[in-house]
Amino acid sequence: MLKEKVTALLEEALKEDQSLFLLDFSVSADNKIKVILDGDNGVTLQDCMNISRAIEHNLDREEEDFALEVASAGAASPLKLPRQYSKNIGRKLEVKTQEDEFEGKLTEASESDITLEWKVREPKPVGKGKITVQKKQTIAISDIKEAKVVLKF
């Protein structure tokens, strides 16, 4: 019953800001509500507070006690939805598929696939030495086991 109530409140709150979207949502057996958000333009503390209030102010603790956590996806969290790829165009990604691992700059993203580009040093076709070659790989989102943004410090 609590999960259905929270789901409805969450859907309503997310309609208020179309740039935000739900990544994960759970209600544990002891009524711990956990909501993980992402947004096309990132997620601010204010966004988390707004969603938290929309849920909390419409639930009665006298009826059912609960704990509520609303957070944004961490910078190191794997990308889960096609929508997340679009907002990361231009950033370096590490992508694992069943067969391969790729690391490159995300240059294109659609609902069904992504394109990574990177440079690699390869032996010259003729003669000694190496040359830098530009590589490009299109990967179906359905083939991706895990994709993460590579953070630079």
Image (spheres, rainbow, N blue to C red):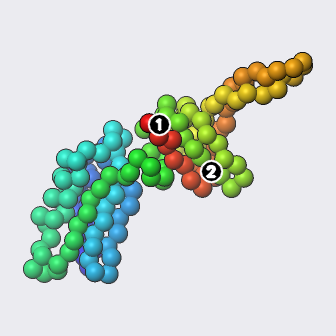
Labelled disc at residue 87: none
Relative vertical location of residue 74 with respect to residue 65 in this rendering, above or below: above
Relative vertical location of residue 95 with respect to residue 105 in this rendering, above or below: below
| Residue 123, visible in the rendered structure | yes
In the rendered image, residue 32, in percent from the top left (x then y), is placed at: 27, 73
Relative vertical location of residue 100 with respect to residue 118 in this rendering, above or below: below
Residue drawn 79% across and 22% down?
Answer: 130
Marked residue nearer the N-terminal end (1 or 2): 2
Residue located beneath label 2 in the image: 96
Residue located beneath label 1 in the image: 152
Q: Residue furthest left?
A: 62
Relative vertical location of residue 52 with respect to residue 95 in this rendering, above or below: below
Q: Secondary structure at mark 2?
A: strand
CA gap between label 1 and label 2 equals 19 Å
Q: Secondary structure at mark 1?
A: loop
Q: Amino acid at mark 2?
A: Lys
Most foreground residue, 126 or 55 = 126
In the rendered image, residue 22, in percent from the top left (x then y), is placed at: 35, 55
Based on the displayed image, in which of its 4 quarters is residue 105 positioned? top right
Q: Residue furthest right?
A: 126
Left or right: 21 as drawn, with respect to 138: left
10 Å neighbourhood of mark 2: few (<14), some, or many (≥20)?
some
In the rendered image, residue 127, in percent from the top left (x then y), is placed at: 90, 18
Residue drawn 32% across and 52% down?
Answer: 72
Q: Amino acid at mark 1?
A: Lys
